[in-house]
């Protein structure tokens, strides 16, 4: 059996970080995810609002680095919950239980400095480990954001 979902969208509000009675962090947030197609009559694209729940270090990561309007890529599993509302009616809701969270865009673009190629190109948080990829700093400006490697170096970055 396979239950895996990957979605990309913008947070509709700041993540809400809470703690269980045993002090386990849990963050709730909603992503606004555009559908890949518009309506048949050529109208506006439709948007789905998908509830997400992250636990432990992933919850703290989301709470610390994401806020309303942030673009996020989330992967995890779809979970359906049955519950009873205040009037006693049976309800059902779907949510994504988050395994991994990735930045959907770089912070550099948000600051309006599009001429500088240095900085954070993407990060993720997954299962207690954080990764960050950065471009090497260049001392002299050039027409290309890529740096030439010296053949005698012997140590490649990959």
Image: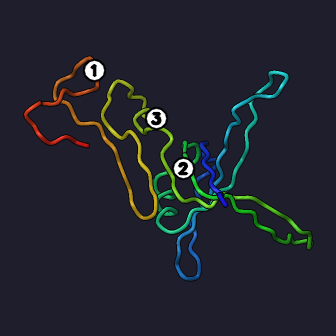
Residue 76 placement, left or right of 47: left
What residue do we see at 62% from left, 61% from top?
Answer: 97
Residue 71 placement, left or right of 65: right
Residue under label 2: 67
Q: Mark 1: which secondary structure? A: loop
What residue do we see at 22% from left, 19% from top?
Answer: 142
Q: Mark 2: which secondary structure? A: loop
Q: Quadrant of the C terminus?
A: top left
**Residues at marks 2 and 3, CA–CA distance in whole angstroms:** 13 Å
**Residues at marks 2 and 1, CA–CA distance in whole angstroms:** 33 Å
Mark earlier in primary sequence (3, 1): 3
Determine which quarter of the picture holds residue 19: bottom right
Q: Residue 144 shows which numbered tag? A: 1
Q: Are marks 3 and 1 in contact (CB under 8 Å)?
A: no
Against 38, is 133 above or below? below
Give the crowd class for mark 2: few <14, some 14-19, many >=20 residues within 10 Å.
some
């Amino acid at each position: 059996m396979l239950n895996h979902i990957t979605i990309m969208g913008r947070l509709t509000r700041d993540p809400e970080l809470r703690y269980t009675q045993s002090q386990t962090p849990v963050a709730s947030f909603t992503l606004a995810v555009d559908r890949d197609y518009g309506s048949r009559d050529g109208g506006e694209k439709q948007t789905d609002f998908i509830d997400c729940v992250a636990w432990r270090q992933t919850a703290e990561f989301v709470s610390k680095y994401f806020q309303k309007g942030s673009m996020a890529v989330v992967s995890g599993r779809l979970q359906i919950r049955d519950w009873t509302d205040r009037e006693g009616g049976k309800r059902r809701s779907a949510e994504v239980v988050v395994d991994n969270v990735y930045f959907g865009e770089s912070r550099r673009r948000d600051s309006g400095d599009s001429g500088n190629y240095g900085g954070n190109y993407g990060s993720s948080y997954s299962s207690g480990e954080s990764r960050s990829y950065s471009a090497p700093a260049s001392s002299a400006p050039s027409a290309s954001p890529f740096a030439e490697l010296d053949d005698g170096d012997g140590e490649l970055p990959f």
